[in-house]
Image (cartoon, rainbow, N blue to C red):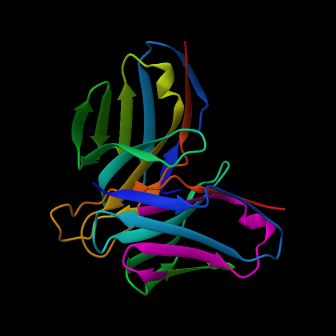
Amino acid sequence: SQTIHQWPATLVQPVGSPLSLECTVEGTSNPNLYWYRQAAGRGLQLLFYSIGIDQISSEVPQNLSASRPQDRQFILSSKKLLLSDSGFYLCAWRPHRGTPQGTNEQFFGPGTRLTVL
Amino acid sequence: QKEVEQDPGPLSVPEGAIVSLNCTYSNSAFQYFMWYRQYSRKGPELLMYTYSSGNKEDGRFTAQVDKSSKYISLFIRDSQPSDSATYLCAMTESGGSNYKLTFGKGTLLTVNP
């Protein structure tokens, strides 16, 4: 079965500090990967998605970036955090189209709660 | 008009009640419809998944899609305190390179014992 991991679970960082959040998926190959941010009252905001290694699309221009150095690893980074970066960050995966599981559901990780002070 | 509208609630019901959660949407190309349940401080978990119009039942949960009205519903029968969570609807078009889901903002449900 497939599992998705995120770490750290919680993070408190000062304004201007760097950020690195990591997501890994087990039990599947070549998944589509997603980073979302969830802020109170604002729903899920798609930040980045990736259909393969080094193939990343940005949805929202901001001071965040994403990388996919390995097939099942997705990293969210920032060089300098802003107060507005606080939120609940969720990683999700979807089976690659064309596989027997090729459907449109996304499966979410446990999330990282980031507080920028 | 937003692509997906969902009443944020909060919705409070007594244990055993039938709960109805709804979303409306504007994009007629949406073909896949999902409901996610999110407990406080946890990631969303997929609850129900339907394709095109019709009903789908899974235990106490029933998902309905009415594409002609651009309206989807999730019914919870015999609601339990453990059903207290935020429920998110999500949907997407079929085919092509569309890998993205469009989410509602979620409805907060509390089931009181």
Left or right: B52, with A39 as reference point: left
Residue drawn at (23%, 36%) of the image: B56
What is the magenta segment's predominant secondary structure? strand
Question: Residue A57 location, x and y as percent?
Answer: 47, 81
**Nearest to the observer: residue B22 or residue A59:** A59
**Nearest to the observer: residue A74 or residue A45:** A74
Residue B13 against residue B52 in the figure, above or below: above
Residue range of the region highlighted in magenta in the rendering:
A68-92
Question: Residue B30 location, x and y as percent?
Answer: 32, 58
Residue drawn at (39%, 65%) of the image: A25
View extreme (left): residue? A100
**Nearest to the observer: residue B72 or residue B12:** B12
Quarter of the rendering occupied by the C terminus of chain B: top right
Residue A24 against residue A69 in the figure, above or below: above
Residue drawn at (59%, 39%) of the image: B40
- Whether residue A80 appears in magenta in the rendering, the answer is yes
Left or right: B1, with A98 as reference point: right
Left or right: A110, with B36 as reference point: right
Quarter of the rendering occupied by the N terminus of chain B: bottom right
* Residue B27 visible in this rendered orientation of the protein: no
Question: Residue B4 location, x and y as percent?
Answer: 48, 52
* Residue A35 visible in this rendered orientation of the protein: yes
Quarter occupied by residue A79: bottom right
